[in-house]
Amino acid sequence: MLIPFDSTPVPAATEQEARLLSCIAIESICGNNECLRKAQALGVSEDTFYKPLHQMVWQACLGLTDAGYPADELGIHCWLRDNSEGEQTPTLQEITALVDSCETTTWFNHWLEVTLDAQSKRQYRQLGMKIAELASEGASADEMGVAMEMKPKSVLAATGSVDKAVVAKEATQRIINLNNSKSGLLGLSTGIDTIDNLLGGIRPHTLNVMAGRPGRGKSTLSLQIALNLATINKRVRFWSLEMSPVQIHNKLALNLAGINYQLAKDGCLTQQQLQNYENASNAIVNMPIDISEESVVTVSQIAGQLHRDIALNPKDSQPELVIVDYLQLVTPSDKRVVREQQIAQMTRDLKGITKDTGIPILLLAQLSRECEKEKREPKMSDLREGGSAEQDADTITFLHWIEGMDPLELKVIVAKNREDQEGKGIVTFNKPLQRIYDKQH
């Protein structure tokens, strides 16, 4: 017998939610945030919690941690009192009871797994209700099939040993794909042969650092890669912590239209160029490039958004690349530790995200002034505050130009390539057109 959805209980694990938050508070009081960071890396967000009290306490833990304060009972109460907009602040007694629901963090992983499992069940329930609604509205079987493909993707990684047969199958398929590939790439193409030949493509499960001094083409190249992928219907999630969405859209449209960036800024375009820009702008609107506009972003927000992109979209509409512009502007999760440790935690967490989801990340980064002062090629130690990237990144690419080089040339240096060779090449950087392309053009 079929049971109506509205008569079935909503899946919830409120007791486990409370104990999960208790573990986070216990660690925070002791000056450690490992539980919080793990929860963030696995995509825990406010929506993960069913009970409103738990949603508020989660937000308070994030706020206190970002501000460098321990998430103890009084701190959580005061934070909620000062930040709850029109919502009734939980009493100190309620918060104390929640924090005291666990004595140790021993069972944290279990509470986390149960809480995330309950969230997935709620998402499946919502999906079922959506399909039932479509059926009642007379939707076709194909339309309901599309909705069924939008099922939540579990963010829980299996524990224990990997399935060696699955690993062998994937490894074999990668070699077959490479053998059959006309381009010789095992990953996404940047659209620039010189860079593709050096990197071997932007591969799944990889953290790819691209670094350079200001004005050396990092943002230009990342936007061009996004545009090249979008034109072949590959979705890109772009996090820009430096430019506004309007600036990004303008750069993409001008690049696509082949219009001089400076002329556009100066308002000196012809009527034909204006028409070309408008056509390109309309085309960009329909391209699969998703721009995140937050100017203050943590790695947990990047992880949360990516998990939402995966859970709420069918497989062929999920992001195939995440671009973050740039590392030094990402907000640290723990502001009390020294800057080098903050950056190290960020790159480690970003590496965990791409490893868990399989979606590669292109992480832009600043180089220090030393290479320019000494008139030499960049090296790993020039990564500004980002020495940990040498360990965490799968590839590290430098974009370099020094006095004496052709103004239109840009040197591409692959200083680290975990699955391929290192190397150097020259590309053309046309600043007026904000385009980078192979030298022979």
Image: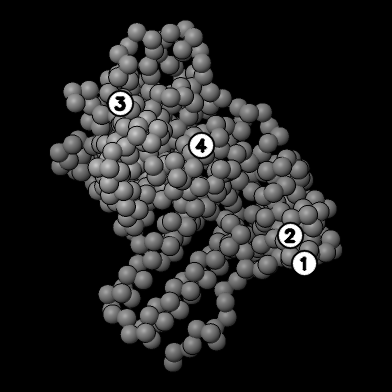
Q: Amino acid at mark 4?
A: Glu
Which amino acid is tagged 2? Answer: Ser
Q: CA distance from mark 2 to mark 4?
A: 29 Å
Q: Are marks 2 and 3 in contact (CB under 8 Å)?
A: no
Q: Earlier in the sequence, mark 4 or mark 3?
A: 4
Task: Residue under label 2, please give it.
Answer: 84
Tell which circle, 2 or 3, labels the residue nearer the N-terminal end: 2
Asked if the residues shown at circle 1 and circle 2 are in contact, with their CB atoms under 8 angstroms apart, the answer is yes
Kind of residue at disc 3: Asn
Q: Are marks 4 and 1 in contact (CB under 8 Å)?
A: no
Q: Residue at x 71, y 34 (%)?
A: 336
Where does the image place residue 118, in percent across and percent down from the top left? Answer: 56, 67
Is disc 3 surrounded by few (<14), some (14 to 19) or many (20+) residues within 10 Å? some
Local secondary structure at mark 1: loop
Q: Callout 1, which amino acid?
A: Gln
Q: Residue at x 32, y 55 (%)?
A: 286
Which of 413/219 is in front?
219
Q: Are marks 4 and 3 in contact (CB under 8 Å)?
A: no
Disc 2 and disc 3: Cα gap in Å? 50 Å
- Looking at the rendered structure, the secondary structure element under dot 4 is loop
The earlier-in-sequence mark between 3 and 1 is: 1
Residue at 42% over, 42% down = 248
How far from the left and from the top, in percent, is residue 8? Answer: 54, 83
Q: Quadrant of residue 223?
A: top left
| Quadrant occupied by the N terminus | bottom left
Instruction: Tell me if label 3 and label 1 are in contact, CB under 8 Å.
Output: no
Residue on which disc 4 sits: 242
